[in-house]
Image (spheres, coloured by chain):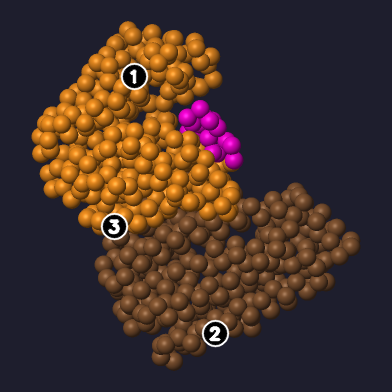
Chain colours: A orange, B brown
Amino acid sequence: MNMKEYTELIEEMLQKEGWPSAPCNLYDPIVYILQQGGKRVRPHLCLLSAELCGGKALQAVKPALAFEMLHNFTLLHDDIMDKAALRRGKPTVYKKWNTNIAILSGDTLFAKAFEQMLQYEGPNKSLLLQLFVRTAIEICEGQQYDLDFETMKQVSEEAYIEMIRLKTAVMLAACLQAGALVADADMQTQNLLYQFGIKIGLAFQIQDDYLDVYADTNRFGKQLGGDIAENKKTYLSLTALQTAQGVDLEQLQYYFSKIDFDKQEKFLAVKRIYDQYQVGETAMRLVHHYYDVAMDLLRQLDISESNKQKLKQYADLLIGREF
Amino acid sequence: MNMKEYTELIEEMLQKEGWPSAPCNLYDPIVYILQQGGKRVRPHLCLLSAELCGGKALQAVKPALAFEMLHNFTLLHDDIMDKAALRRGKPTVYKKWNTNIAILSGDTLFAKAFEQMLQYEGPNKSLLLQLFVRTAIEICEGQQYDLDFETMKQVSEEAYIEMIRLKTAVMLAACLQAGALVADADMQTQNLLYQFGIKIGLAFQIQDDYLDVYADTNRFGKQLGGDIAENKKTYLSLTALQTAQGVDLEQLQYYFSKIDFDKQEKFLAVKRIYDQYQVGETAMRLVHHYYDVAMDLLRQLDISESNKQKLKQYADLLIGREF
């Protein structure tokens, strides 16, 4: 199957799910967020991995949907915590309905994700369930670290990488491993795919940090400087806080101490310091590094060259590789 | 085993669980709520049911803990939605920490409950997992109906009973069925125990509604009129709204239209109408009815008379039977 067929399969299965109509305040928000689409990266990875390991994409549909539901559950709750008004260009559930409804429909979607996983019948069901629940716990841990970092003056690079590993990378990694489990691949293959997912996830997130400041706005499609406006800890901000000195450091700390600045003024002032200390370049070096490690892992995989190319292509698509 | 031994077993296993220490904002609230104790009704029912069906309580520990965790997860999130400042006499997690932490530690506890269930090894694992996830979904539905009712002028008795069935009764019923599944009891036994749990759960909740107005405060241990102060739909309020007429109905609607009344004045005014239309008696008649149906179901169970007595005793303890 190709990506388009994966997407059609996922959309078809999500449609078929047949959500209950009542209570509508519980299920309407779930249908609303699932129908918004998004890139469907997680189910893609799951289906792709199953095929690359010699299994059938169709066999991996239940885990693929379970991870997509798990991802959307995290969005429902994260948007409350991050006070995000928009998601995929539409009002978030907590804004369109309210916080209580976003909490409860999130809880329900979380349970539905487990239910989906329980419906899987095939090899390694027990391992798949364990992987799924461990991943869910790790994502919560990552989100908690992210929240904790907001009020911390300085965060170490190590702690930051661990946070994005938990918050972003483990789910991509788990989707790849899940596909391998469905195809009953050996443990070496499972581990290499998992680690590949971790490295690609880290590269993706650090590049996302970079793009918030340095993206070509014509192509990026969203406003720059969102992270800076909200004082979010990113790889760029923590690198700048570590390397800037004298008045630059003071200015950085001043701008990151409040959120009621003029957005554009703050963005330009912070970006000037980022430029001066070349934190964008530092970030992109790390993106390259993780990408290279991922490619090393890919080479070690015991699958055909053409299958390796398919996985590389998807990873390139995911991190919009331009380097 | 007796109840004291059940409790010791549950507390010991909860202690052993060994929660991670970091991120502390995620795990401290979980340890905090689990250590508060509570009556441990759900794990009791699970262990008791396993023994009554000829199994061993020890075999049912994992499901018992899973249901206790599921219950505490719902409390973490319900307290946010209900803006409850106190729980078991202590500040709720969302008050002691904050809303975001209560959401996330709840999510984590939910995932941990599933993890606990996955660790069960014994008969009917797959059915236990299905029962668990279905129950979790139903509880969310019940909580959503409860929230929906808050802003509705009138709620039918049928809709109210369905709400408390989902919100309160299904978890008690599921715990009893889970014990039966652990003991590999036949389907008839499972169903009778489940239905017994539903009826006892309904009786418990309606009596709880009654006690909010008519409890002996020396023994009840909490202030009367909490439901009335917050305009919560209860069996008493909906019965009163259905039966009161003329100025009584107008007064009732007036008092239930706002929350900024003097609490004591409102309580006495509403209670006067409840008294006049004997809604307390109507409620207790329904408690008796559900209790009687539960006892009918108990008689049909294919277990020894002494075991039936044990279950009856626990149900009597649960609904503090004084009638």
The residue range painted magenta reads A81-97
Q: Amino acid at mark 3?
A: Glu
**Does any portion of residue A211 appear in the rendered image?**
yes
Q: Quadrant of the C terminus of chain A?
A: top left
Sequence-wise, which precedes: disc 1 or disc 3?
A: 3
Q: Secondary structure at mark 1?
A: helix
**Image quadrant containing the N terminus of chain A:** top left
* Residue at which label 3 appears: A121
Q: Amino acid at mark 2?
A: Met
Identify the residue at image location x=38%, y=38%: A8
Q: Is residue A70 above or below residue B173?
A: above
Q: Is residue A200 left or right of residue A95?
A: left
As drawn, is A28 to the left or to the right of A228?
right
Q: Position of residue B114 (x, y in %)?
A: 36, 57
Q: Nearer the viewer, residue B308 or A248?
A: B308
Residue type at mark 1?
Tyr
Residue B42 is labelled as: none
Q: Residue at x 47, y 79 (%)?
A: B192
On screen, residue B160 above or below A112:
below
Residue pointed to by mark 1: A210
For disc 2, the marked residue is: B295
- Residue B195 is situated, as x and y percent measured from the top left of the image, at 51, 76
Q: CA distance from mark 1 to mark 3?
A: 41 Å
Classify A135 as above or below B160.
Answer: above
Question: At numbered mark 3, what does the secondary structure look like: helix, strand or loop?
Answer: loop
Report the mark closest to the observer, 1 or 3: 3
Give the residue displayed 60% in from the left and 78% down from the top: B290
Q: Closest to the observer: A176 or A183?
A: A183
Subunit under mark 3: A
**The residue marked by circle 2 belongs to what chain?**
B
Judge left or right: residue A57 versus residue B221.
left
Q: What is the CA distance from the residue labelled 2 to the residue labelled 1?
A: 66 Å
